[in-house]
Image (spheres, coloured by chain):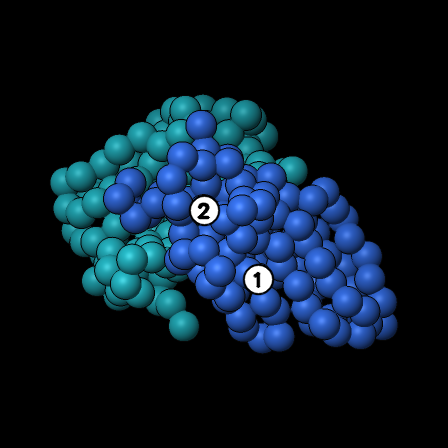
């Protein structure tokens, strides 16, 4: 079945460090890909998305590129801040399947001053 | 910013009690979802709805039930709560086609349920 695999956390970085969170997927077809973020005590918020191969999603300094050849959607940020501390979820969906999201297991990021 | 609300935010109850978790959205979205988030953070779809009087079970089997009598309201009910139901429950909604071919979901803040 379709699935999403993320790098395991927790990830601890110093402020202004470079961030990469790896995400790969297994799917029959070409899903839409998402990164959601969950801040402590809150629900999930959409961070960015991409709908087709080579699309780049970006928001708040975060970027991810839809790589069909490697079935990947890695999240990157050039300089993290303490306020970026949260749990990040990679997810996929197929619009012709009602848009149900399939999530990765989540990666906890902690940024220290 | 999405307008989707969940109440209560936190609930501690004893075994055997009946509970209803409320979820409401003011965006007029047709699709609504319930996810269960375990302590290890993984999210599992337990129920979804494509519109009024439409409900389906999700990928993770759940003893809970849902109803969709009004577009904006999608409550989840546990008839007899048990400690194994202790979890965080997240509600979400989406409008097909709002962003073209993608189907972005908007999440509520969640209800953290503890069953003693």
Residue A8, image x, y percentages: 72, 42
Residue at coordinates 47% horizontally, 63% vertically from top-left?
Answer: A55
Residue B69, image x, y percentages: 16, 45
Q: Residues within 10 Å of mark 2 (few under 14, many from 20)?
A: many
Snapshot quadrant of residue A64: bottom right
Of the 4 image quadrants, the one containing the N terminus of chain B is bottom left
Q: Could you say which disc has been placed on residue A64 in the image? A: 1
Q: Identify the residue under disc 2.
A: A92
N-terminal-most mark, 2 or 1: 1
Residue A49, image x, y percentages: 46, 61
Q: Residues within 10 Å of mark 1 (few under 14, many from 20)?
A: many
Q: Residue furthest front?
A: A69
* Residue A70 visible here: yes
Residue at coordinates 73% horizontally, 63% vertically from top-left?
Answer: A19
| Measured Cα–Cα span from mark 2 to mark 1 | 13 Å
- Label 1, secondary structure: give it: strand
Q: Nearer the viewer, residue A107 or B113?
A: A107
Snapshot quadrant of residue B28: bottom left
State which chain is coloured blue: A
**The colour assigned to chain B within the rendered structure:** cyan
Does residue B30 appear left or right of residue A51 in this picture? left
């Amino acid at each position: 079945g379709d699935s999403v695999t993320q790098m395991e956390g927790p990830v601890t970085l110093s402020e202004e460090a470079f961030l990469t969170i790896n995400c790969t997927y297994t799917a029959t077809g070409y899903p839409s890909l998402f990164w959601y973020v969950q801040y402590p005590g809150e629900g999930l918020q959409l961070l960015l998305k991409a709908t087709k191969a080579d699309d780049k999603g970006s928001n708040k300094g975060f970027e991810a590129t839809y790589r069909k050849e490697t079935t990947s959607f890695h999240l990157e940020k050039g300089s993290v801040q303490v306020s970026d501390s949260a749990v990040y979820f990679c997810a996929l969906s197929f619009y012709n399947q009602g848009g149900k999201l399939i999530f990765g297991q989540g990666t906890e990021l902690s940024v220290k001053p | 910013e999405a307008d989707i609300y969940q109440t209560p935010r936190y609930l501690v109850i004893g075994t055997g009690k009946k509970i209803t978790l409320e979820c409401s959205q003011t965006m007029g979205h047709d699709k609504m979802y319930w996810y269960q988030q375990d302590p290890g953070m993984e999210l599992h779809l337990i129920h979804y709805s494509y519109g009024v009087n439409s409900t389906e079970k999700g990928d993770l089997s759940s003893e809970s039930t849902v109803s969709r009598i009004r577009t904006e309201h999608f409550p989840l009910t546990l008839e007899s709560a048990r400690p194994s139901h202790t979890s965080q429950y997240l509600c979400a909604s989406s409008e097909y086609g709002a962003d073209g071919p993608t189907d972005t979901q908007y999440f509520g803040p969640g209800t953290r349920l503890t069953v003693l």
